[in-house]
Image: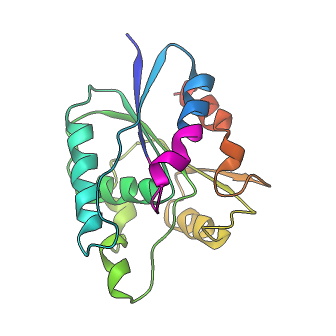
């Protein structure tokens, strides 16, 4: 039976299409023993409740998955995976979480409030859950300081700092696949 990977896309106009090469790279690097599911998140990102819409869809995807699910996400999708896991009880057994260039939302603007993690979010994540973070120093979308902030909040997670690759990691998730195969 194939191991299941749920990949949550990045945001922005065309985020789903932009991340298709990431998903293809991950599937190719994982090989035939894995199946990467890539649902399109449908929400109007200009609507005040768009984060809640994404979180609901993430929850629905996790709920129908079998135990041993591997979660992966890019950018906005990665940050919302952390939010979902820290704010909800998950009945599906998660094997690991792999987050590529997730923003650490902060600020006082109204639009950012639904995206922010709750204080103490790290303690609310499932215990003993392997969590991996990946970010390139030359990421032009998410400042590298966000990676450092996650490091400070989650000392038990594994952090992979990459010298170059931009926000899309040159559309090469082989480093993520290597870590997934080690689970």
Q: Position of residue 156 (x, y in %)?
A: 52, 52
Q: Residue furthest bottom?
A: 108
Residue at 30 percent of width and 55 percent of height: 84
Q: Is residue 132 visible?
A: no
Q: Position of residue 7 (x, y in %)?
A: 43, 40
Q: Which residue lies furthest to the top in this view?
A: 1
Q: Answer above or below: position of 41 versus 45.
A: above
Residue at 50 percent of width and 60 percent of height: 154
Tell me which colouring the rendered structure shows.
Answer: rainbow
Q: Where are the magenta residues, as a range?
A: 9-22
Residue 14 lies in the magenta stretch: yes
Q: Answer above or below: position of 149 versus 34.
A: below
Q: Quadrant of residue 101?
A: bottom right
Q: Answer above or below: position of 44 versus 56.
A: below
Q: Quadrant of the N terminus?
A: top left
Say left or right for 57 vs 95: left
Say left or right for 60 vs 71: left
Residue 109 lies in the magenta stretch: no
Q: Where is residue 143 in the image (x, y as percent from the top left)?
A: 64, 71
Say left or right for 105 vs 123: right
Q: Looking at this view, is 21 or 118 the one in front?
A: 21
Q: Looking at this view, is 46 or 49 the one in front?
A: 46
Q: Answer above or below: position of 155 versus 21.
A: below
Q: Looking at this view, is 104 or 120 the one in front?
A: 104
């Amino acid at each position: 039976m194939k191991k299941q990977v749920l990949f949550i896309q990045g945001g922005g106009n065309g985020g789903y299409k932009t991340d298709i090469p990431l998903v293809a790279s991950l599937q190719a690097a994982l090989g035939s023993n894995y199946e990467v599911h890539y649902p399109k998140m449908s929400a109007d990102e200009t609507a005040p409740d768009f984060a809640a819409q994404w979180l609901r869809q993430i929850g629905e995807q996790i709920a129908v998955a079998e135990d041993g699910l591997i979660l992966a996400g890019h950018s906005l999708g990665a940050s919302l995976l952390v939010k979902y896991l820290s704010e909800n009880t998950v009945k599906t057994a998660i094997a690991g979480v792999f987050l590529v260039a997730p923003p650490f939302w902060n600020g006082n603007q109204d639009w950012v409030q639904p995206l922010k993690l709750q204080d103490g979010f790290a303690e609310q994540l499932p215990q003993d859950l392997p969590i991996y973070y990946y970010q390139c120093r030359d990421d032009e979308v998410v400042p590298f300081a966000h990676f450092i902030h996650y490091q400070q909040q989650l000392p038990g997670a594994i952090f992979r700092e990459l010298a170059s690759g931009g926000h899309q990691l040159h559309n090469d998730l082989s480093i993520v696949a290597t870590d997934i195969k080690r689970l």
